[in-house]
Image (cartoon, grey):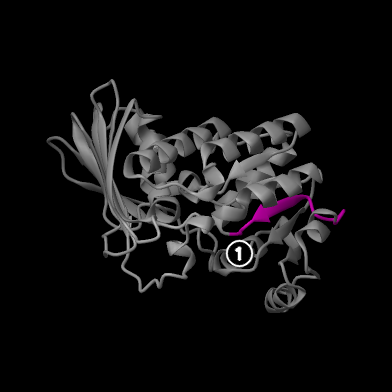
């Protein structure tokens, strides 16, 4: 594939709008179609974002011959169905996180993409953020010695009534898959899949997690202290502690604009990103990586590998098992 990459956006919520705006700010990408479960919603989205075609069904979008890649922006409860539909139609797929509701669904998506020879990537924008990539390079290069502890949290307090999707087990509700996926993925990025998993949580009357703490352990002696919440305001910060220093990401660790490197015996260094394209939120890095990989004929990204997404889903499954959260889709 050469030239402009043509995107089809599946769903019309806030994250779809944010992604669309970022893609439209790129010189070699275009959003050519959008789909929703209702034509009215799709048309409204298309008019607001200047998109040529609006479809009232997912099937129409994936059948569009002018769509190269489908961006799945539905709630995670529908990721498996939407991404499967696109892959079976021969489309490359970028699928929002959490990748799916459970590791079984994730394995099915990966197997389908590999069977069809199509590109598939979880939209874990954290891994593609330039600041996080620099942080990872420094850690892997030994800047703070061997990792001993990773700390990360993501939480906010919201007035979510019983009928809200975040309280609905049928929709994969709870803090873990919406917010906890970020600290878990951050720990995986630096340390890989854990050898041991402990967790505790406050559950809602519906049986989803409202406030969750996790302790992950590795045979190397490293551990990760992670938390997520929809009932408490967290700093959304991260710290990586090593034998020769530490790195502090003081806010928005999942898409930071800077971090502080504190080497033992040296003055702190603040490391920031470059200026970047104006007006873009950070989701453009996903679109750029998808385009690069698809043009190169790659079926997955080395920066967001499918085995890594599967490993994160296994950890999320294990955490849910420890805290007693089950979804109907697990059966």
- Give the residue drawn at x 60%, y 34%: 107
Q: Position of residue 85 (x, y in %)?
A: 75, 48
Q: Nearer the viewer, residue 31 or 308?
A: 308
State which region is magenta: 64-74
Q: Nearer the viewer, residue 275 or 303?
A: 303
Quadrant hosting residue 21: bottom right
In the picture, which quadrant includes the N terminus? top right
Relative vertical location of residue 8 with respect to residue 310 in this rendering, above or below: below
Q: Residue furthest right?
A: 65
**Direction from residue 132 to residue 165 in the image, left or right:** right
Relative vertical location of residue 277 with respect to residue 146 in this rendering, above or below: below
**Direction from residue 233 to residue 54 in the image, left or right:** right
Q: Position of residue 39 (x, y in %)?
A: 77, 73
Relative vertical location of residue 214 with respect to residue 45 in this rendering, above or below: above
Q: Nearer the viewer, residue 232 or 256?
A: 232
**Direction from residue 53 to residue 262 in the image, left or right:** left
């Amino acid at each position: 594939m050469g030239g402009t990459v043509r995107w089809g956006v599946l769903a019309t919520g806030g994250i779809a709008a944010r992604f669309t705006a970022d893609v439209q700010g790129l010189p070699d990408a275009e959003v050519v179609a959008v789909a929703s479960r209702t034509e009215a919603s799709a048309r409204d989205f298309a008019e607001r974002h200047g998109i040529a075609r609006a479809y009232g069904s997912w099937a129409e979008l994936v059948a569009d011959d002018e769509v190269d890649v489908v961006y799945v922006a539905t709630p995670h409860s529908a990721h498996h169905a939407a991404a499967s539909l696109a892959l079976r139609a021969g489309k490359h797929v970028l699928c929002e996180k959490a990748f799916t509701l459970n590791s079984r669904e994730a394995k099915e998506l990966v197997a389908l993409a590999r069977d069809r020879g199509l590109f598939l990537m979880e939209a874990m924008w954290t891994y593609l953020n330039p600041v996080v990539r620099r942080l990872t390079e420094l850690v892997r290069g030994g800047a703070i010695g061997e990792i001993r502890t990773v700390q990360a949290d993501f939480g906010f307090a919201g007035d979510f009534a019983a009928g809200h999707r975040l309280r609905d087990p049928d929709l994969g509700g709870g803090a873990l898959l919406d917010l906890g996926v970020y600290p878990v993925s951050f720990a995986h990025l630096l340390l890989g899949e854990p050898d041991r998993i402990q967790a505790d949580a406050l559950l809602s009357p519906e049986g989803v997690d409202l406030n969750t703490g996790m302790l992950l352990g590795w045979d190397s002696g490293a551990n990760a202290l992670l938390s997520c919440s929809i009932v408490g305001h967290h700093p959304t910060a991260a710290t990586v502690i090593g034998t020769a220093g530490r790195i502090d990401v003081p806010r928005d660790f999942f898409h930071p604009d800077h971090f502080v490197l504190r080497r033992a015996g040296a003055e702190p260094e603040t490391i920031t990103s470059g200026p970047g394209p104006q007006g873009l939120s950070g989701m453009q890095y996903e679109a750029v990586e998808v385009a690069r990989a698809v043009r190169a004929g790659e079926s997955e990204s080395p920066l967001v590998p499918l085995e890594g997404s599967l490993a994160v889903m296994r950890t999320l499954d294990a955490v849910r098992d420890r805290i007693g959260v089950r979804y109907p889709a697990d059966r």
